[in-house]
Amino acid sequence: MAGPTQQRELRDQEEAVLFAPVLGTTRRFWLGAAPLLALTLWGMYAYTLQLRYGLGVTGLNRPVAWGFYIVNFVFFIGISHAGTLISAILRLCKAEWRRPITRAAEAITVLVLFFGLGSIIMDLGRPDRLFYVLQYGRLQSPLLWDVTSITTYLTGSSLYLYLPLIPDLALVRDRATGWRRTLYTFLALGWRGTPGQHRRLERGIAVMAVLVIPVAISVHTVVSWVFSMTLQPMWKSTIFGPYFVTGAIFSGIAALIISMAAVRRAYRLENYLKPVHFNGLSLLLMVMSLLWFYFTFAEHMTAYYGGELGEAMVLFAKVTGRYAPEFWAMVVLNFVIPMAILANRRTRTVAGCVVASASVVVGMWLERYLIVVPTLANPRLPYERGFYAPTWVEVSITAGAVAFFILLYMVFTKLFPIISIWEVREGREGLQEAHERMAGYLPGPVEPAAPAAPAPTAARG
Amino acid sequence: MERAWRVIPLTVALFALAFIGWMIRMLQLSWVRNDSWGFTVAVASVVIPIFLVYLWLALYVLWGIAREGQGGGGEGRP
Amino acid sequence: MRWGMVVDLDRCTGCQACVVTCKAENNVPVVPPEHAHAGRLMLWMEVIPEVEGEFPNVRARFIPRPCQQCDSPPCVKVCPVQAMTKSPEGIVSHVFARCIGCRFCVQACPYGVTHFNWQAPRWPGDLREALNPDMAVRPTGVVEMCDFCAHRLQHAREHARAEGHEVRGEGDYVPACVQACPARALIFGDLDDPGTEAARLARGPRAYRMLEDLGTAPKVFYLKEG
């Protein structure tokens, strides 16, 4: 058995790959970032045209006055549920396999929420009057519920990202030089790993893990209520809350899998992000796919059976009419492909998970589109049918937003370790404890630990 | 630079207070305008406690960690 | 006092005088042809043709559709900044200076009467000279809709005060479309005053309202063909 110094050296060798992206940048990074930056700038240019000429540069009209931007809003907010599920729920369930995943998940959440907010600001006819929402807001309006809930969630998930980041910031601080060292010293809040600090930190994380779950559920519920509190056909549905939350978690896990696979490849983290982690996440993805199918089926079956005129028009527009290609593509992308790939262990490889996840991400965007546009194109009054064709402005802005999000995520991985180093260490040191806990589930008394487990403080010292 | 450690905890605390202040303003506005009082009270009674928790987090957790980190310099191993 | 309108579908000839008058009275912008085809026509009062049957057994009907001025207006409920309001006399109107252009009211209205300014409004040529000084001109990016010519109600109040009485439920104030209709298909008045013609017709056997079962309680009543 290697002595403590040798153990530490081995650990440092192993962990070098976690620090490498933060401490230096390869040319590959710039090569990857350049096209994303170009796409981002193109999207920004398209938006300046919209600012100059008004929303007329989009394909929006009467009655389809909401289109790509609202779809993007719901889509991005949906992806933000990645962090909550993995981080908070798995933490509360004491699932050990969440350790290398939590940071990536929490980062996605915080970053993508800004894009959700940005999407809705882009949809406003008068973004210069944005602050009227704060000054003159009315809490009877679902949009105000959105503002409140998303602010609460953004604050909470930023805190929930920051708290477990502090010990890692201290680790990086000790290895960094120059301006980075100043930055990390500032951000690390003087972390020294004392028992007092640990106590406070763990208290904070435990409280946030519990709090952030109902907040997250409330976020996508109120987003769904923007639609279901109106009287429009197939929007006025009581299950929109759970339906949207399910869809959000579904798309969130998919986005997480893709980002994990990407960083695994780019930063050579195969030692930390193993097939077992992808297996766990993709089993969750499968469950969410089934749940999503269940809700979608229930929604459409109810509309079909009752045959209420307004709803029937929207339903048939989706299933057999103008939106049928998108609808069936959505079903294939969200259900058929993921289930086919993930139900079979042999295809449930890392690559298989990524393909299934990519399919889900596109399928879920289509799902948001199919919620917004067909209803608006088929109003209750039978006197007009609408149509909607996005212009290059909307497509460019959407592409720019996605590119910018990926870019910001890449920058995040450059500034902060994408895998929570101290939590992985804690996992290793806590193996005995975890073993005892699991032994406690079995009948009979728990046997005391064989070799004395090192005291928690000493292990972290 | 000496006081830099206070920035993050104070920013979070001030943001939490600002949000609670905004909620109180919303309550006042809805009372004066006699518009959506029920909704405002319902939403405020949920989010104000949440932001009080954030305030606690800023003061107990963040401020506490930072203050403990001050005694004895910033070096150390986690 | 609740201002309501009754539309006699038997009398409406589809001449669209109400449409044109409304546009003139309320400074509603003109849109270029490609926008009109793309579903961006701005018609606060719109005459919708409803055609049933095949030639030669065709039945055509014309349905003037102003804002239905609901008593339980979904547009007011969903506006985040109180840019949609309902006055104590039941007039649902829009505050252009407050609107942030989110178009939630456009989506919440089951009748589709809210219009959005997709671009800076323009009035080509001589139309500029014909702008009504009593009515605001809206900028780009805000919503607008029929408000039963509430500026005319303002005038009527001032006149009535000068003459020393309250605005009467009938005759003192009518929206421009009601005034312009050559077939007198539009009747306007106080629905709460049982003596007015509007109230009488609204209670009659021919009266119905659009999408009545949604619970929006519109104050525009339509008289079925008798």
Image: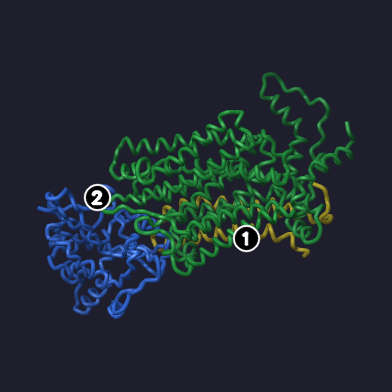
Chain colours: A green, B yellow, C blue
Q: Using the image, tell me which numbered label, if any, was put on residue B14.
A: 1
Q: Chain of mark 1?
A: B
Q: Secondary structure at mark 1?
A: helix
Q: Looking at the picture, does residue A78 appear above or below residue A392? A: above
Q: Are marks 1 and 2 on the same chain?
A: no
Query: Residue A321, percent across and down?
Result: 35, 44
Q: Chain of mark 2?
A: C
Q: Looking at the picture, does residue A329 appear above or below residue C166? A: above
Query: Given the image, on which type of amino acid does mark 2 rest?
Result: Glu
Residue displayed at 85% across by 40% down: A8
In the displayed structure image, the side of residue A118 where residue C12 appears, left or right: left
Query: Residue B68, percent across and down?
Result: 77, 53
Looking at the image, the residue that sits furthest to the left is C226
Residue displayed at 44% across by 48% down: A369
Query: Residue A363, percent across and down?
Result: 49, 43
Which residue is nearer to you in this view: A96 or C13?
A: C13
In the displayed structure image, the side of residue A347 where residue A143 appears, left or right: left
C-alpha distance separating marks 1 and 2: 50 Å
Tell me which corner region of the image, top left, top right, bottom left or bottom right, holds residue C70: bottom left
Tell me which corner region of the image, top left, top right, bottom left or bottom right, holds residue B2: bottom right
Tell me which corner region of the image, top left, top right, bottom left or bottom right, holds residue C184: bottom left
Residue A205 in view of the camera: no
Query: Given the image, on which type of amino acid does mark 1 rest?
Result: Leu
Which residue is nearer to you in this view: C81 or C42?
A: C42
Q: Secondary structure at mark 2?
A: helix
Q: Looking at the picture, does residue A414 appear above or below residue C196? A: above
Residue A348 in view of the camera: yes
Residue position for label 2: C212
Q: Residues within 10 Å of mark 2 (few under 14, many from 20)?
A: few
Looking at the image, the residue that sits furthest to the top is A444
Labelled pair 1, 2 in contact (Cβ < 8 Å): no
